[in-house]
Image (cartoon, rainbow, N blue to C red):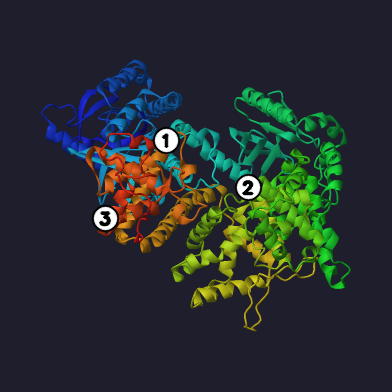
Amino acid sequence: MWLKPEEVLLKNALKLWVTQKSSGYFILQRRRGHGDGGGRFTGRLVGALDAVLDSNARVAPFRILLQVPGSQVYSAIACGATAEEINQHWEWLEQNLLHTLSVFDNKEDIVSFVKGKVKALIAEETSSKLAEQEEDPEKFREALVKFESRFNFPEAEKLITYYSCCCWKGKVPRQGWLYLSINHLCFYSFFLGKELKLIIPWVEVQKLERTSNVFMTDTVRVTTANKERDFSTFLNITEAFRIMEQLADVTLRRLLDNEIFELDPGLQDPTQITKRDLEARAQNEFFRAFFRLPRKEKLHEVVDCSLWTPFSRCHTAGRMYTSDSYICFASKENGCCNVIIPLREVISIEKMEDTSLLPNPIIVSIRSKTAFQFIELKDRDTLVENLLQRLKEVNSNNPLHSNNLQNNNQNCLAFGSMCVLRDGEPAHLETEASEGKERSECEKENSYLLNAEALRSDFHQSGMSDLDFGKSREQIKESLWDDHFVEYGRTVCMFRTEKIRKLVAMGIPESLRGKLWLLFSDAETDLASHPGYYVHLVEASMGKCCMATEEIERDLHRSLPEHPAFQSETGIAALRRVLTAYAHRNPKIGYCQSMNILTSVLLLYAKEEEAFWLLVAVCERMLPDYFNHRVIGAQVDQSVFEELIKEQLPELAEHMKDLTALASISLSWFLTLFLSIMPLESAVNVVDCFFYDGIKAIFQLGLAILEANAVDLCNSKDDGQALMILSRFLEHVKNEESPLPPIGNHHAFFSDDQEASPVTEIANLIHDSYEKFGDHSVAQIEHMRYKHRIRVLQGHEDTTKQNVLRVVIPDVSILPEDLEELYDLFKREHLIRCYWEVPSPVAERHDPSRPYAEQYRIDAQQFTNLYRLVSPWTCGEHTDVLAQRAFRLLDENMDQLIEFKGLASCLDVMYNGEMNEKIKLLYRLHIPPALTEDERDSQSPLRNPLLSTSRPLVIGKSNG
């Protein structure tokens, strides 16, 4: 293969390389010892040096150097694994370059020409290799054969990819091959006559990170419960780590987090997953997180381009992202300009004439008579064709939208005025949803009357003279926003720049807050796409009783009880309807604590149906995995926050060696977006930032709060005092510009300390958070989430294990350490079946929502495997018969599955039971239900004994 030209000193390489051919400008060399029949020791020695010093040398024993006559500096331009391969490169150089070089007079020109030619060949070779990889090239098939022969996995264990690298054992590296399969990380090395095989199941990985040590600057460290393994000298460590990260995340969540986790369609069958699928998943995850789009959105194209930005009167360089229902743009300069265009807002997509000033342009026209101009698009024709096809599909799925499109165009205003009006519906929603509204009016009259306005409009306390200043500030803010709308647009398709972020940080005006929340979260698109959906949900869910509705009723009167809106039946009824409708829509989440606090605030600023769709946006895409039985998402972000504290506030982290307490305090910050621990008039400003910037806003605000209290926290004596410091600080975060009267927070911390605390202005706190801690990108946060999700899931597994052992240990005489090993075997047997059985039995046999002792279960075949391995009652060819009978005896509910406690109790009798207990167990293994009708008629020596079965026998209990 051709190499990027790199200088080498030939003088230092003579002992390791042998020159085979030379010409005026090129030298072909062979690695010393390679291919020598009598050079066995030399080959081993040089091979060992290759493994330690240079991983590429081991796989490339031949190379070609560019030499400049009269110079001691040479450049490596090609390498090869075989003589045939390197000779092909040599012949190409002789035929295409050797004669051409004689025309150059300057040696530097020769070097420049050859290097440029080689780089062009590399680019061509790279593009062809990418195409070959998608077609499963011969090299991959060879690697697959080696993987199967070396590790002897079942055929269902699919190899994803492989890399040449070193595995470090102490200070010594072992050169070999890293194989990444769907369930395992494997490493193979044959080094100086010694073979090394390493197998690490992804489900046992507790930490996966890139790190550095004194020997290597860039290493992938894989940590399990018992060991750390370092891998280095990858040709492309970024790609290798990304694939490892994806495999660990997918496998761990598939096997350990199946309560709510749903894989993308292309990843649901593990045997069909490819490297391309994993790379696509990584791109999709970033795309959806960056633009905060629904999980169903699939990314199709990522294209470099430039977008005309009228506010700066120039084209802004960036990238276009296209998915099933959206066209999005992000500038290359972070935060400069982002645009989200739902296809349902698009009227047309057209190609313009190609000119030198506007190369490859397209125009995307939307319903507010606004047009977006994109230029410098590669493969423009195919892109436009694909976009038009998706636009057609969107229109066909929304016939009401398609039929009324022309009417909407006529009713829309000029550029920048597709306004979500301050006191009314957006024009395009009124027309589009008219049929749905007419259809639902009759339903509402006969059933439940929904709130047509935000609760704040009915329960707003006005006429207070001391609020005049706040009102004047509101008017100034409204004026600033109106000016911004004119220049940047006021629909979901607005230009999102640093300027709008500054306006949001100042606090959104009360009159615009609900509508802007809808725009920033894109809940408006969901609302407009589903006319009548919420009404039907309310009809279907109200009046039905289940666990979720009982929990909702219990929490209704705990939701902002200090606000007059929720001291009335109007507010309580609206809150009940929204929470119940959502629990009906998404039974996997149902209802979780803190949803009531968030929803009550949404109802203050948005109409009831709008509040429902805002709740959908928060629960299903802005805070993924937060609202479920185990609040995995919140714990992951809590762990990410702990890492950010170490990174951004090192002095505080150094003083407080254990940051778990601070991170635990922050859990309520993430779950309620500070609504439960700040005065309401201040906390809504935090929610403003959250809807615009996502979880990033909560992270940076949390850091700003800790920094503001760093001195006091460093002087605190214990965790309780630290909690008191933070609670008192948050209680005194005020919003002097709010037009509303101060509303206390019943969740706030109270103490007997009468010392007055200084007041902190929320706008200043938010400003500091952006200035000091606002530099983390979405990609960085998502990467940290991947890393810490592994830790959180494994932490839950450890908790489950400890609780199961705590329940079982009092009932058996098995030593705790032996019982722990037995649990590990039990879980491993469960996982082995989940690895390769199709369809996977994960959902059936692992339920994290069940009690700890019942979460993992195994079937008869798995029990038989364990019985053969650990039971003292083995009986040659009859062992399997005894195992099957023992399984039927333990399977009391006859669901063909047993829990760990059943296995442990059975083995406890076999190993530690008194003689009469063992006899009773043996007796019960020869009568129903252990004995089946088929076995009664068999001639087996294990058929039922002629004994009375009138007396019940219970394992582990007296039968006297």
Q: Quadrant of the C terminus?
A: bottom left
State the CA–CA distance, disc 3 to disc 1: 32 Å
C-alpha span from label 2 to label 3: 45 Å
Q: Where is residue 446 in the image (x, y as percent from the top left)?
A: 85, 46
Counting residues from the N terminus, which is met first, the one under dot 2 or under dot 3?
A: 2
Q: Which of marks 3 and 1 is in front?
A: 3
Q: Distance between the residues labelled 1 and 2?
A: 28 Å
Q: Which of 913 and 817 is in front in this view?
A: 913
Q: Position of residue 275 (x, y in %)?
A: 45, 33
Residue type beneath disc 3: Tyr
Looking at this view, name the residue that lies furthest to the left: 38
The N terminus sits in image quarter: top left
Q: Quadrant of residue 327?
A: top right
Q: Mark 2 points at which residue?
A: 587
Residue underneath mark 1 = 837
**Residue 664: percent from left, percent from top:** 53, 64
Q: Is mark 1 on a helix, strand or loop?
A: loop
Circle 3 sits on which residue?
Answer: 911
Quadrant of residue 801 within the rendered picture: bottom left
